[in-house]
Amino acid sequence: MGSRILYGKNIIKKFGDSEVLHGVDVEITEGDFTVVMGSSGSGKSTLLYLLSGMDKPSDGEIFYRDSEISKASEKELTHLRASQFGFVFQRTHLIGNLTVSENIRMAGLIGGLSEKECKSKAAELIRKMNLEKVEDHLPSEVSGGEAQRTAVARAVINRPAVIFADEPTGALNRANSTEVLNLLTMLNENGQTVLLVTHDRESALRGNRVLYLDDGRITGELSLSNYAGKDAGREEKLADWLEGLRW
């Protein structure tokens, strides 16, 4: 079993007078594929943004390894996000005037890689993610699936310790969704920690651990570690668990 890589204690998040997270405790183990599920407005994305240092809690503590990131400076957080964390969102947020290859390489440069390293790693990722035919195309010239695969490549060029994925298949059709989920699964199998926010059962089945967030509180946790990826029992276990939570 891996060591703890992310930890949040009594996380509270308020937006004005509205409290979105109510004293959440959460722990992410290195090498896990953790899925956070819940209905719209339950606080899933808010929790992901806090754990990744993209936002700060109103109260509580958040640690990455042994460092408390909830009290880190913006400069420290910027470095952490660039060097240790990778991000994939529902919208790709690719830079419109850069090609697919340039978008991927740019993330490497920001993360501190040399130009030579960026070119080499980008070329490797382009091959792995089947983007050779569009590597010189602009984001407006590629399909939604190709754009999201580019976003995944951009997120992992620095070999981040944790990949944060917020509804990465939400705007994709089933075939493209499967491709993106396959990539995340492959990265996890290669040792990278994945934290995925989703409302989709097919996506949730990729995890080895599922957390359920309801009205700003974690109200359920399910381990799928004992079920192989294509095991029918895995799907049945998740369905029964969600039904018990009235989801």
Image (cartoon, helix red, strand yellow):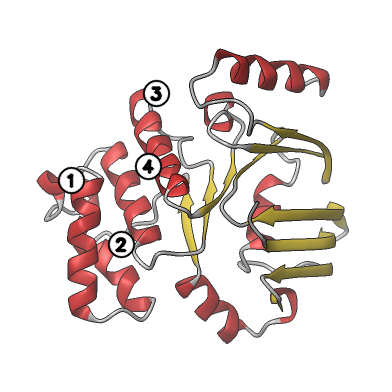
Q: Who comes first in sequence, dot 3 or dot 1? A: 1
**Percent position of residue 106, x then y:** 29, 71
Of pointers 1 and 4, the one earlier in the residue sequence: 1
Which residue occupies the foreground of this view, 181 or 199? Answer: 181
Q: Amino acid at mark 4?
A: Leu
Q: Which residue is mark 4?
A: 183
Image quadrant of residue 123?
Answer: bottom left
| 3 and 1 marks in contact (CB < 8 Å) | no
Considering depth in this image, is 216 or 14 the residue closer to the camera?
216
Nearer the observer: mark 4 or 2; the answer is 4
Residue that mark 3 sits on: 174
Q: Do callouts 1 and 4 mark residues in contact (Cβ within 8 Å)?
A: no
Q: Can you tell which quarter of the image residue 133 is in?
A: top left
Residue 48 appears anywhere in the view: yes
Q: Residues within 10 Å of mark 3 (few under 14, many from 20)?
A: few
Left or right of 121? Residue 175 is right
Q: Earlier in the sequence, mark 2 or mark 1?
A: 2
Tell me the amino acid under the disc marked 1.
Glu
Amino acid under disc 3: Arg
Percent position of residue 245, x then y: 82, 24
> Which dot marks residue 141?
1
Pointer 4 with pointer 2, Cβ within 8 A: no
